[in-house]
Image (spheres, rainbow, N blue to C red):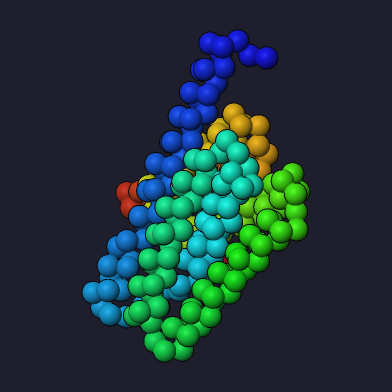
Amino acid sequence: MLPIELSSVYLGCSFAAGIAGNLFAFVLFVSPIPTFKRIIRNKSTEQFSGLPYIYAFLNCLICLWYGTPFVNTGIILVATVNSFGAVFQLIYISIFIAHAEKEIKMRMLGLLLVVLALFGLIVFVSLRVLDYEERQIFVGYLSVVSLISMFASPLFIIKLVIKTRSVEFMPFYLSLATFLMSLSFSAYGVFKDDPFLYVPNGIGTILAIVQLALYFYYSSVSRGDLREPLLVTYV
């Protein structure tokens, strides 16, 4: 058993990591606001896709459920951050549906209903079929799969950066916020001794480091190209 003083420091560090994760996640949640301001201004979704927001909404719901006392006690900061995230994603989805063309509007509404039905099924199975420990494992694995899939989505952007040798489509501050959020919740998971938190967020931290490394490398390459243009001869 830890001494009282050490235990207090441990709890303080855990709380600080969770709060930091909430703050950095908030940065990510508000990052699409310029996109939706444009959609509202132009009264059109143009070529934007609503699928990332549908998926993010499902991810937030699953992780929110995992953080509630019904599934796991002592990680309420996971529930708080994902409750905010779910609200933001639902607002974005509502704006998207309101300004989408009829065919896309119906498809998005259908996907939203599927997400809500799927989440309802997860809650039902968790509470009615599984006991507390089984519930924790079941929802924990679902949250891990969901989080890893979310963190893996930037792999497309990483591929695009390498292909185009440009960081135009990988904003620095979003990559930095992703890194800090993943690192914070990875530490929070370690403090809580919860592999369902520190494993996916650890993977997210590594992928964010790769993004930041690519950003610094290709932004320096671009600046170098601007100063000293290369002449390429094809033979």
Q: Is residue 144 visible?
A: no
Q: Residue at x 45, y 29 (%)?
A: 16
Q: Name above or below for residue 53 compared with residue 143.
A: below
Residue 230 position within the rendered picture, expressed as x and y whole percent measured from the top left: 41, 55
Residue 185 position within the rendered picture, expressed as x and y whole percent measured from the top left: 53, 39
For this rendering, which residue is in front, 114 or 101?
Answer: 114
Q: Residue at x 75, y 58 (%)?
A: 129
Most distant residue in the left direction = 41
Q: Name above or below for residue 18 compared with residue 228.
A: above
For this rendering, which residue is in front, 192 or 171?
Answer: 192
Q: Is residue 71 left or right of residue 42?
A: right
Q: Is residue 112 visible?
A: yes
Name the image quarter holding residue 146.
bottom right
Viewport quadrant of the N terminus: top right
Residue 167 position within the rendered picture, expressed as x and y whole percent measured from the top left: 42, 55
Residue 234 position within the rendered picture, expressed as x and y whole percent measured from the top left: 52, 67
For this rendering, which residue is in front, 49 or 123?
Answer: 123
